[in-house]
Amino acid sequence: MHGTERLLDRLEREQRLDAIADSVSGFWASALRSERLRDVLCGRRLGHPLHPAAILVPAGTLLSATLLDTTAGAALRPAARRLIALGLLSAGPAALAGWSDWLDTRGAERRVGLVHAASNIVGLASYAVSWNQRRRGSRGLAASVAGAAALGLGGWLGGHLAYAQGVGVDTTAFQRGPADWTDVLAASEVTAEPRKIEVDGVPVLLTRVDGRIVAISDRCTHRGGPLHEGERVGGCVRCPWHGSRFELASGEVVHGPATRPQQVYEVRETAGRVQIRRPEVRALRANPVGPSAGPRETRPRITAEGHAVAAAERPRQHV
């Protein structure tokens, strides 16, 4: 384990941050309690988290100001000051989106996210000092460079949150499910009450909508909550962990904080039995490790709650 990994590992395990995180979380949970506001901040309409896109403007303008400070002459100092002003003004919405995402984290992700936010706050404060110094006739270079360094640290931690810890990533992105029509259980066993089964090791939610059997991924795309344990609200199901709401028939997100829809499986009834299969998956979701590695199908292990043995003994049917 190299130096940066050791540092990140220590940060993830630093439980002394939890008390601070609890206090900060209480504040933001109260400030962002509006469901409509959370929908906007999470990026539901975009189909992915808003925060990574929103930070482009403040990060780009503030770092550009520092670049002008260190490479350009005095003639461009007014431009650098305007860039800092724009960066500070645009940082507010980006920060709100980030805090909204952070509210739904726990443990290691929560600790890293807290330090990520603290680094960015230090960076923004440094740039605010620099802007004020320029307004009074000083150059403000030292504060600008300090702000860039703090934002760099915050960006590095943000990358770790997304790419190493998976915050904001669809938790079902690499789930596949059966490619062929696969028998799962008797149609008479499917009711309006959401029911979980497993096919190829993938949890699937089965239920009826207007009498029709539908199947979606049971694992919430947001943080992996078990949807079958959630409340059914009309034609939707509410995640029991963070309250995301999905249409059962289409998998679409009705309310955040989830931004990605649930995987919907094709369903058919044959001789009183329910069969499901997944639609065609993207190449990366088939999880090849190289250009010559094609999708690999394996015989599924099928389980259904209360009917595991019977389901497992019934062979897969191909069409």
Image (spheres, rainbow, N blue to C red):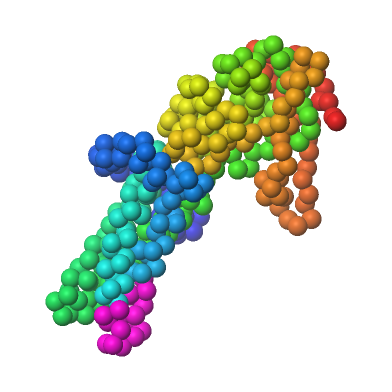
Does residue 238 appear left or right of residue 288 in this picture? Answer: left
Outermost residue toward the front? 210
User: Which residue is the extreme one toward the right?
Assistant: 319
Point out residue 299 in the picture as x, y percentages from the top left corner.
Answer: 79, 31
User: In the image, is 258 to the left or to the right of 293?
Assistant: left
Does residue 105 sit above or below 247 in this rendering? below
**Quarter of the picture holding the C terminus:** top right
Return the x and y of residue 192 as percentages of the image width and height: 58, 16
Q: Which residues are magenta?
A: 63-79
| Magenta segment includes 171 | no
> Would you say residue 146 is visible in this rendering?
no
User: Which secondary structure dominates the residues rendered in magenta?
Assistant: helix
Q: Is residue 49 left or right of residue 154?
A: right
Query: Which residue lies at the image location 39% right of the left edge and 59% below the top edge?
Result: 55
Image position, residue 41 (x, y; %): 38, 46
Residue at image coords 26%, 40%: 31
